[in-house]
Image (spheres, rainbow, N blue to C red):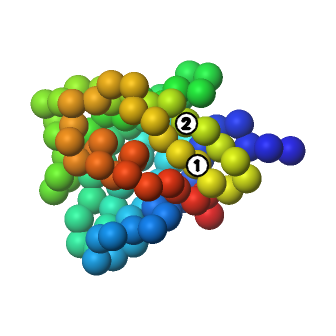
């Protein structure tokens, strides 16, 4: 059966950063973007095929940007995010510049 929502531990495909970038989506609605020595902690909410993120704290967290919203598509273990609306530059770069793989 196909997975309907992204969840758990995801790793970014074709990562151009020095260390692999991961995104952890916890069941309690918290999330963590991390790579090497930095992380962004926040929350997420899923409605249908749309996911929204809100940065709370961390080295590159943009707590003033507000909620960022993306459409997601899951094909097997691969997940792609398409920008709907987001003012957080770092979050946009992390989510849409390459696909993700659910581990």
Q: Quadrant of the N terminus?
A: top right
Q: Judge left or right: residue 92 versus residue 77.
A: left
Q: Which residue is mark 1?
A: 79
Instruction: Name the foreground residue: 47 vs 97.
Output: 97
Q: Residue 26: horizontal and vertical position, in percent?
A: 51, 47
Q: Which residue is mark 2?
A: 72
Query: Which class describes the residues within 10 Å of circle 2: few (<14), some (14-19), or many (20+)?
Result: some
Seen at 30% across and 42% down, the residue is: 92
Q: Measure the alpha-carbon separation of dots 2 and 1.
A: 7 Å
Compared to residue 14, the image places residue 66 above or below, namely above
Whether residue 32 is visible here, answered yes or no, is: no
Q: Judge left or right: residue 25 versus residue 7.
A: left
Callout 2 touching callout 1 (CB < 8 Å): yes
Q: Judge left or right: residue 62 versus residue 79.
A: left
The tag on residue 3 is none
Q: Residue 103: horizontal and vertical position, in percent?
A: 62, 64
Q: Residue 48: horizontal and vertical position, in percent?
A: 61, 23
Reading the chain from its start, which is encountered first: label 2 or label 1? 2
Q: Secondary structure at mark 2?
A: strand
Based on the displayed image, in which of its 4 quarters is residue 67 positioned?
top left
Seen at 33% across and 76% down, the residue is: 19
Seen at 53% across and 45% down, the residue is: 80
Seen at 16% across and 56% down, the residue is: 59
Whether residue 44 is visible here, answered yes or no, is: yes
């Amino acid at each position: 059966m196909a997975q309907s929502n992204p969840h758990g531990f995801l790793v970014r495909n074709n990562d151009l950063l020095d260390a692999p970038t991961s995104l952890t989506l916890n069941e309690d609605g918290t999330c963590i973007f991390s790579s090497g020595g930095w992380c962004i902690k926040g929350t997420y909410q899923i409605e249908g095929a749309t996911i929204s993120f809100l940065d709370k704290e961390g080295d590159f967290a943009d707590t003033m940007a507000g909620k960022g919203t993306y459409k997601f598509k899951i094909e097997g273990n691969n997940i792609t995010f398409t920008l709907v609306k987001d003012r957080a530059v770092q979050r946009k770069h992390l989510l849409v510049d390459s696909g993700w793989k659910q581990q």
